[in-house]
Each structure stands twice: as C-alpha cells, then as structure tokens.
Amino acid sequence: MSARTLKSRPSRPLAEYDFVVVGAGPAGAVVANRLSEDPSVRVLLLEAGPSDNALAYAPILNTYLIFTELSWNFMTERPGSACRGLEDERCPWPSGRGAGGGSGMNAMIYTRGHQANYDDWAARGNTGWSYEEVLPYFLKSERVNIPQLRKSPFHGHSGNLTVRHVPFTSQLMESFIEAGRLAGYSRVDYSDPRSQEGFSQIQATVDEDGLRSSAVTAFMRPVANRPNLHMAFNTRVTKVLIDPKTMRAYGVEYKTRGIGHADHLREFGIPVLKDLPVGDNLLEHLGMNGLVFLIDQPVGLLAHELLANVVGYTAELVNNRRGPLTSLGCEAIGFVRTKYANLTGGLPDLELLFVPSAINQDGGYSLRKTMGVTDALYDNVYADIDRRHAFTIWPIPLYPRSKGTVRLRDADPLSKVRIYPNFLTHPLDVAVMVEGLKTAVEMGEGPAFRWAGARLHRVPFPRCARLQFGSEPYWECAAREMTSQFHHQCCTAGMGRVVDPRLRVYGVQGLRLADASVMPDMVGGHTQATCYMIGEKAADMIKEDWNMLR
C-alpha cells in the first residue's frame, strides 16, 4: 500500500494562500477539498502528523493503531472518580494525528446521533444547524453501499465516503440482534430519523475493497494533484498570527498569543488577545469494557487464530475483498432507552456495542493496552481465561452530564495539555451506566446466546470484591475501575460560547473552527459522521461568505 501514500507538495509552501486549513481530520480534509474545487483560490492544508500508515487500511487492526504515530497519545490527569484500574489511575486519551485525523485510526463506525440533537442545537440560537438543515451535508459526503438502503432518502448515494456493512461477521452478531428483538426492539436503519431506537449491524466507513474509507481515501487522495491545493505533513502549527489592532487572523507559524480564558493565559505569561471559554464543557462517551461472556463454540475473533492464518486471510482480503481482516472488531449496535430516558427528552439514552471478542482475546495485548489496564487487575480477573472464545457488550451512556476541562500545561506550544475529564461525577451518568451493565448482562446470558453456552465471567474486580457481584453498587464500582473511552471528545469550543453559528471565532476576523470542538453538546452516537457533516457545512459557509458558491 506504499504506492497510496500521500506526499507533501510542493516541497516549500508558497508565502501566501487564500485559505490555510490546519488539521487534516474529517472536517479539515473536507474543507480543503471543497474550497480547492474553485481553481481561482489557493489552499494550504497543514497536518502535524504523518501522511499515511499502511497498517490503517485493514479494518481489524484499528485497536493496534491507538499507540502508534497516528495518535497524540494524551493521558488525562487523575480523575479519581474513574479509571481506577488503569495505569497510574489515569485515562488514556487517544486522538487522531496524521492524515485523516481520527478517521485514520478509529473503528469506522458511522452513526449520526438523533435528529433531536441537531434541532436542540438550533433551538439554542445556532441558526442553520437543525436536523433538516444539516441532513443535506450528511448526504453530500456519503455513498451508501447497503442494498436495502440504496433508495433511502436519508442516505447519500454519490458522495466521497463509502458506508456499508462489512463482508465478514461472526455467527454471534445475529444473536445480538435477536437479543434485541426479544427485548422488544426492531432491526432498524439507525440513520433514518424515524427509527434510531433499535438494533442493527454497524454501518461502517469501509470501501468496496474491504479497506478503511477515511478522510484520506475519500477527500485527500482523489484531489492530491490539484495544482491549487498544497498539503504539508509533519508540520505542526504552533501559532495563529492575529493582528492585535484589527483582530484579524492573517497567517500561521510553523510563541504563543492566546485565545482562551484570560486568567489562565496570564498564569503562563501569555498575552491575552481574546477572553473566551476555550477548553470548557469537555464531553466524551464512556463505556465499561470489563464484561466477558465466555462461550463454548469457537465462533468469536481471537488474535492468535487470526495471526496463525494471516497469509490466507490476507489473500482472501486482496483477492476476494472478504474475510476476517475486513472486520471492525465490533459488529452491531443497539440504541435503547433506560428508565432514565425521560430526562433526555425520551430519546434513546444508551448504546449497546457488540464485540465478538473480549479483553482476554489476545493475552490482553490490544484492548488491555489500549485501555491501559494494570497488570495486577488483568492477572487477577482475566489471566485464567486468556485467549478463550468470548464476546462482550459495551454499555455507552449517550448523553454524558459530567463535564471536564482542557488546560495548558505551560507556555510551550509543544507541551501536552492537561486534561481533566471529571468522568462519572454526575449521578445520572453513573445511573445510566449501571442500567446499561445490567441490560448487557441480561442480554448476554439470555436465550439468544444460549446455543453458544454464553455465561458471564464472574470473577470480581479486586477493589469491588467487598460488594455483592452483580448488585448496583458492584456495577458502579466496576465502571469506575474499568472505564473506557470511545474517542468522541467534543464541545470545548462550542457554538454560542467560542464560535458563532457560522463557526467564526468571536471577536477574531478570518478565523474559523470546524471539528468536534464546535459541537454545542454531545450527539447520541459516534461522532465521525458529524465531523464530516461539520466540514461540509463549514466549506459551504466559507464559500458563501467569499462569493464562491456556484
């Protein structure tokens, strides 16, 4: 796949461009692509990370990418309220770095959240962001390749980004969907605003060759030779240049003047240009990855079995575009309502993510290392079931109320930021998580999986052993021990607080933000699709303001 690798071009950027886009993630890549459609403007796309990584293309390898050059590999400060069973009691905080951003290392899950999420954004004063107004931008990016959805008005059919069901799933996936049916839920298209509540095979950003479809493959590589679009990789922007007299952004630097909390900036001697609540309202989707349902049938995904047959599986991928290397590692989703759903307007408030393997599947190498689980916890709870066939169901509360912050570590722009996640500090987050764990256990040990002999591995976490296993206090303790994140960090520069509805930074001319940070609040699903939509809408707003719309 080395022939696919993007290269910086030209070798030396020009002195001036009409538009400079910083960050080649799902939104940034879309903005650069769409703006450079006009041959009369010059666009520069700058990315701090590498241009590509061949390991990113086989979907099954996504969990192994977390601690590579494709991630910033942040760690949170100790939250105290969560991540207690993880190394140094801190939460790993992967974040996309390199061409494609998060789309180059994520699990390729395509969901949009609920239509009411966007209507709520608009109701808060963010004109233009209702579901009806953002739907065209979801459709613009998408090229759905799911036979039963090819005529759906709620899916795009000619966009850049392929969305499909992957060709390989385990026998367990249909049992999970059957478990949903037995609980009263239908099989649905969760991107259809009429039917998000229910169960479905995952809609995934995987192309017709069975490989990852990302911002690189969909929006960067097809236009890499446009003469008016220049790209520079391994190029870290340390400063946005802003004229303090006119408050207009006029360039970038490859030390720091600040837009953010004035007192916080002054703490490090950084001149304050604009006092804005940057870094507040940090939200993230949490799960608990410690449930292991052992099975008697060899139908799950085990890493050592994949490695033992990797030559044959690679040939199957290359020649037939099929096989286990096309698996996302996760297979299906259920969007359900707990007894607390009335507090979120009656929307589904819990996601159940089905995975045909578990933390024990490879000796704890990938999931365990990705999560940062300590040796002591893993050995105490999982060593005796190492590399045995199993599955897990991750409960994910969809609307977190626990809000964190991001702060500077010092005045050095190359220093990693301090992340205070404040996970599970709001009682509703805890309550929904506990309900989710109870629901997952009920489904995993229910009749749908009985054919496989499924039963929950009931070894307690050491620090929770004083509590009755399976009780609500036990599940709360377990969630605080085995906290896992889904890389959906958002909302720290939200519309109405840091940017206006046209994504312009308040008080600064010529500077816009377009990524998950501008979301006013979390959406009820994975955030990848929303970021593509934000990029599409941002590009159109810029074109409109610069009289570029044709």
Image: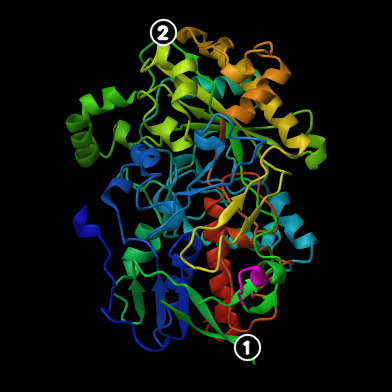
Find residue 60 and report its horizontal and vertical position in percent: 35, 37
What residue is shown at x 47% (from left), y 22% (from top)? 376
Q: CA distance from mark 2 to mark 1?
A: 68 Å
Residue 267 counted in the magenta span: yes
- Of the residues shown, which amino acid type is indicated by label 2? Asp
**Disc 2 residue crowd, few under 14, some 14–19, many 20+, Cα 10 Å:** few
Which amino acid type is shown beneath numbered disc 1? Pro
Q: Point out residue 183 in the picture as x, y percentages from the top left corner.
A: 66, 20
What number of labels is visible?
A: 2
Image spot of residue 488 (x, y percent): 56, 48
In front here: 57 or 252?
252
| Identity of the residue drawn at 61% across and 17% down | 441
Among the 4 quarters of the image, the one containing residue 133: bottom right
Q: Secondary structure at mark 1?
A: loop
Q: Residue at x 34, y 68 (%)?
A: 233
**What residue is shown with label 1?**
244
Q: Which residues are magenta?
A: 265-270
Q: Is residue 318 left or right of residue 105?
A: left
* In magenta stretch: residue 25: no
Image quadrant assignment for residue 72: bottom left
- Above or below, comparing residue 291 to residue 295 in the picture: below
Q: Nearer the viewer, residue 165 or 101?
A: 101
- Viewer-proximal residue, 8 or 33? 8
Q: Residue placed at 74% from the left, 67% from the top?
A: 496
Tell whether 341 sits left or right of 459: right
- Whether pointer 2 and pointer 1 mark residues with C-beta atoms closer than 8 Å, the reply is no
Residue ID for mark 2: 296
Tell me if residue 469 can be seen: yes
Inspect this view and state whether residue 461 appears: no
